[in-house]
Amino acid sequence: MAVVENKKARFDYQILERFEAGIVLSGHEAKAVHVGKASIVGSYVKIYNKEAWLVGAQISPYQEKNVPPGYDQNRARKLLLHKKEIAVLVGKVQEKSLTLVPLKLYNKGRRVKIEIALAKSKKAPDKREAIKKRDLEREVGRRLKR
C-alpha cells in the first residue's frame, strides 16, 4: 500500500530501473509515515561514502505537541541497500548522467520502504507530449461515459 507517492517524478523523469530500499527512521517518524504525514516531492537520492541518502524529504511530526527537541523534519535519511546495488547505482549515475529519484514511500508489514528509480530527465517537448496524451485520454474517457 503506497502511503506517499511522488507523481511529479513520473512527469519530470523517464523511469528506467526501479529499486526497493529500506529507510532509517526514528519511532515517531515511522508512525508519521504510517498515517501519511510525509512528502517526497522534490526530494532526491544522493550517494556519499558508499551509502545512499534521501535528501529533501519532509516527514512532519506525528504529534505536534510531542516533538523531540531539535527535530528537523527535512533532515537527510539513510537508505538501506546492498553494497552491490549501491555499486551498480554509482556506476550508472556517473556513466550515463542519470538521476536517482524516490517514487513512493510505503509500508511493507511493519517496515517502511521506499521505491527509488534510476531516471533520465525529460526535455520540454517530451513533457508537452505527455500533457497532450493525458488530455486526449481524458477527452476519450469523457466521451465514452456519455
Image (tube, rainbow, N blue to C red):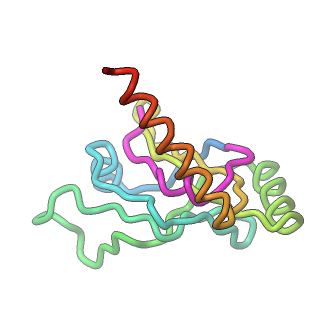
Locate residue 78, reporting x and y percent: 55, 61
Horizontal side, residue 56 vs residue 120: left or right? left
The residue sitting at 10% across, 65% down in the picture is 65
The residue sitting at 75% across, 65% down in the picture is 50
Residue 112 in the image: above or below residue 127: above
Residue 43 in the image: above or below residue 133: below
Locate residue 51, reporting x and y percent: 68, 64
Q: Quadrant of residue 99?
A: bottom right
Horizontal side, residue 76 vs residue 85: left or right? left
The residue sitting at 49% across, 35% down in the picture is 137
- Quadrant holding the C terminus: top left
The residue sitting at 37% across, 41% down in the picture is 3
Q: Is residue 17 magenta?
A: yes
Residue 139 in the image: above or below residue 98: above
Horizontal side, residue 98 vs residue 3: left or right? right
Q: Quadrant of residue 119?
A: bottom right
Q: Quadrant of residue 100?
A: bottom right
> Which residue appears farthest toward the left when viewing the image?
65
Locate residue 82, reporting x and y percent: 73, 48
The magenta stretch is: 1-18
